[in-house]
Image (tube, rainbow, N blue to C red):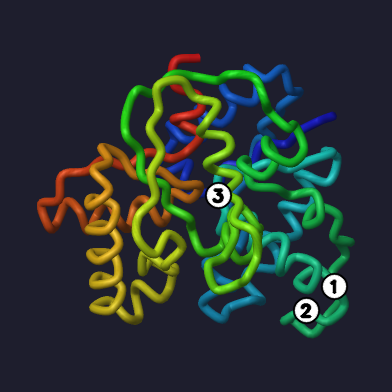
């Protein structure tokens, strides 16, 4: 199978090590991975802010770049969720511009976050890297409730966590979860801009719960959540580090 690696703009600009770790991990597993040149934002910031017309050209470009792949894999649950949930509408006849797009949407159904791709499609079972540290698991909202990476606490379903399943393949790791394991960290994209005080307090509460586990690191599948919590921790003088889950899975390979 041919995999197109999508590295969201904020990962490319702020967390390039996450993009490199994703590529390294996929290649280590023997997968056919290509990074298409010229890729850019998926349009999530525009769509979430109410400017969907501005997101349509970006969705069309994404469709052109990635339509030839069997899977599109990204280290970002929020971008993946935006593509899966919104591209069929943005590229459909009833889009925000009032016109039909010239691009038929093919990418949405094959776009996956790297965690669900490794867990559900590749079905990784062999041992991965080494990370001899205590790690608190952060379940990002998009991952829980739109991509199904873990069981939402508000539903009466059997508990599962695909992130934990993959981390258990790493030698030396001690995985814990905070109280209220799937409660929002307060980032929420535009929410953190429009409701700054509420967002900051939610972030502080969340980081404190992670620290209470005794963990050295917080990990999760979305850099935006980790970035928000890391900023809160730095401002509050809290002693805990943050790493994207693919960095831990690829550590020591």
- Number of labelled discs? 3
Label 1: few (<14), some (14–19) or many (≥20) C-alpha neighbours in 10 Å: some
Residue depicted at 60% across the width and 66% down the height: 145
Q: CA–CA distance between discs 2 and 1?
A: 6 Å
Residue depicted at 45% across the width and 47% down the height: 220
Q: Is residue 108 left or right of residue 188?
A: right
Residue depicted at 48% across the width and 41% down the height: 12
Label 2: few (<14), some (14–19) or many (≥20) C-alpha neighbours in 10 Å: some
Name the residue that disc number 1 marks.
Answer: 92
* Of pointers 3 and 1, the one earlier in the residue sequence: 3
Image disc number at residue 160: none
Q: Is residue 126 left or right of residue 78?
A: right
- Report which quarter residue 73 is drawn in: top right
Q: Nearer the viewer, mark 3 or mark 1?
A: 3
Name above or below for residue 7 compared with residue 229. above
> Residue 146, percent across and down?
64, 64
Q: Nearer the viewer, mark 2 or mark 3?
A: 3
Name the residue that disc number 2 marks.
Answer: 95
Q: Residue furthest top?
A: 253
Name the residue that disc number 3 marks.
Answer: 76
Of residue 35 and residue 128, the one placed in the foreground of this image is: 128
Of residue 188 and residue 42, the one placed in the foreground of this image is: 188
Q: Residue furthest bottom?
A: 98
Q: Which type of secondary structure does the marked residue at label 3 adopt?
A: loop
Q: Are marks 2 and 1 in contact (CB under 8 Å)?
A: yes
Q: Quadrant of the N terminus?
A: top right
């Amino acid at each position: 199978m041919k995999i197109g690696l999508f590295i969201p703009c904020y990962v490319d600009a702020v967390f390039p090590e996450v993009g490199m770790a994703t590529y390294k991990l996929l290649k280590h597993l023997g997968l056919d991975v290509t990074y298409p040149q010229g890729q850019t934002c998926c349009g999530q910031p525009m769509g979430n802010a109410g400017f969907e017309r501005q997101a349509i050209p970006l969705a069309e470009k994404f469709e052109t770049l990635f339509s030839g792949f069997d899977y599109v894999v990204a280290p970002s649950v929020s971008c993946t969720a935006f593509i899966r949930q919104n591209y069929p509408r943005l590229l459909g006849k009833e889009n925000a511009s009032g016109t039909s797009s010239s691009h038929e949407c093919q990418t949405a159904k094959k776009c996956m976050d790297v965690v669900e791709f490794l867990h559900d499609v590749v079905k990784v079972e062999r041992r991965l890297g080494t990370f001899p540290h205590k790690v608190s698991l952060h379940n990002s909202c998009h991952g829980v409730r739109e991509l199904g990476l873990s069981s939402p606490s508000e539903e009466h379903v059997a508990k599962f966590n695909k992130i934990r399943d993959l981390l258990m393949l790493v030698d030396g790791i001690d995985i814990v979860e905070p109280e209220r394991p799937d409660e929002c960290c307060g980032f929420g994209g535009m929410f953190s801009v429009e409701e700054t005080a509420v967002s900051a307090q939610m972030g502080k509460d969340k980081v404190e719960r992670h620290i209470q586990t005794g963990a050295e690191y917080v990990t999760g599948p979305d850099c935006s959540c980790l970035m928000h919590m890391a900023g809160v921790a730095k401002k509050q003088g809290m002693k805990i580090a943050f790493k994207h889950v693919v960095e831990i899975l690829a550590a020591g390979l």
